[in-house]
Structures are given as C-alpha cells and as structure tokens.
Image (cartoon, helix red, strand yellow):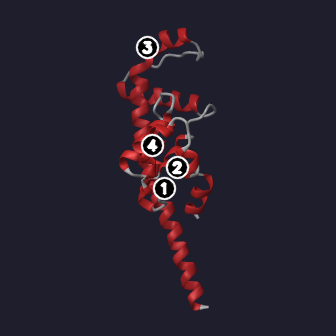
Amino acid sequence: MPKKLLKRISPTKEDLQNHKFLSAFGKLLHNPNLWHFNKHSISGAAALGIFCAFIPVPFQMVIAAAVAIYIHVNMPVAIVMVWISNPVTMAPMFYSCYLVGAWFLNTTTSEFAFELSWQWLATSLAEIWQPFLLGCFIVGAISAILGYISMRGLWRLAMVRKWQKRAKNRIL
C-alpha cells in the first residue's frame, strides 16, 4: 500500500532529470538507487525530506535532491516530503520553531507581526535568528526521526498485511 501510494504521488524520473534546477546534477541522476522503492530508501528519504522542510531557505527541494544523491535514498520521495513546508503551513511551522528555540535558549518571546518586506526581515530577523534557527534544527531533527520511524512502521504494517493475505490465499 505505501509503495503504490508513494509511486503514484512521486514525480517521475524523467520529470526530475529534465527539471531546470536538478539538471545540474547531470549523470548523477542516473544512479538506480535514487529510484528504488524499498524500506531503507523510502524511510531515509522521508527523514531527509522532512528535515529539509524545516530549513528556512528557498529551494529546499534542491537541497533535498542533492543530499538524496549523496546518501543514496529515493529522491522523488525526499522531494515530495519537502512539500510539508508550503505557503499554508510555513508560518505556523516556523513560528513554532521560533517558540521551541526560545524555550531551549531560555529567552523571552517577543510578539511580532510578520510582514513580507526587506525592512521587516532586516529588523526583526536580527532579533530572532538564534532561537529561530535552533528551533528549526531541533524540530526538524525530531520530525525527521519520527518520520523515519513512522515510515518504517507503515512499511512493516503493509508487509505483514501482504504476508497475511498470501497465507490466506494459500489456505483457500
């Protein structure tokens, strides 16, 4: 079940090889390990993608693709998992990261109104960058570990169900 779902929602090999940012990787994209769907590759890719979703930079998908190539995990799944961070979820994700970082640094949280402008970034980010980045790292690492464990558990559950179905069909 997870394998079929992941194959259905993942970008195709050709789409990724022809992508304007990923084409820079050239022949590295021809590694067959990047396209395998097995429990090790999928679990590692899920953890990588979730961790990259918490990196507060643009082009998170390119970072996930580059690391997937380096550590030989399924690149399409890593890229799909980065989509956790999107325009709808980004504000709550990063605000919660800021709160976690402030809690770990034992600093007071300041109320601020987010504005998408260079002036706001220059003034506000100078005050909150340490708790924000620490929180992104902590929440990203914990989420990646939970994603890895969850994906392994889902894979195991799917395999047990498949084995049970085979055993039931053998009896009949």
Whether residue 60 sits left or right of residue 138 in the image: it is right
Rate crowding at label 2 as few (under 14), some (14 to 19) or many (20 or more) other CA atoms within 10 Å: many
What amino acid is labelled 2 in the image? Pro
Which disc is residue 26 wearing?
4
Q: Mark 2 sits on what residue?
A: 76
Determine the secondary structure under disc 2. Answer: helix
Nearer to us: label 3 or label 1: 1
Q: CA distance from mark 4 to mark 2?
A: 16 Å
| Residue at the spot 57% in from the left edge and 31% down from the top edge | 90
| Contact? badges 4 and 2 (CB < 8 Å) | no
Rate crowding at label 1 as few (under 14), some (14 to 19) or many (20 or more) other CA atoms within 10 Å: many
| Contact? badges 3 and 4 (CB < 8 Å) | no
Determine the secondary structure under disc 1. Answer: loop
| Contact? badges 1 and 4 (CB < 8 Å) | no
| Residue at the spot 39% in from the left edge and 36% down from the top edge | 138
Identify which residue, 43 or 17, lies in the foreground: 17
Q: Mark 3 sits on what residue?
A: 127
Q: Position of residue 78 (x, y in %)?
A: 49, 47
Q: CA distance from mark 1 to mark 4?
A: 15 Å
Q: Mark 3 or 1 closer to N-term? A: 1
Nearer to us: label 1 or label 4: 4
What amino acid is labelled 3 in the image? Glu
What amino acid is labelled 4 in the image? Gly
Quadrant into which the C terminus falls = bottom right
Q: Mark 1 or 2 closer to N-term? A: 1
Q: Is residue 103 visible?
A: no
Q: Mark 1 or 4 closer to N-term? A: 4
Q: Position of residue 34 (x, y in %)?
A: 45, 53
Determine the secondary structure under disc 3. Answer: helix
Q: Position of residue 101 (x, y in %)?
A: 41, 28
Q: Mark 1 sits on what residue?
A: 35
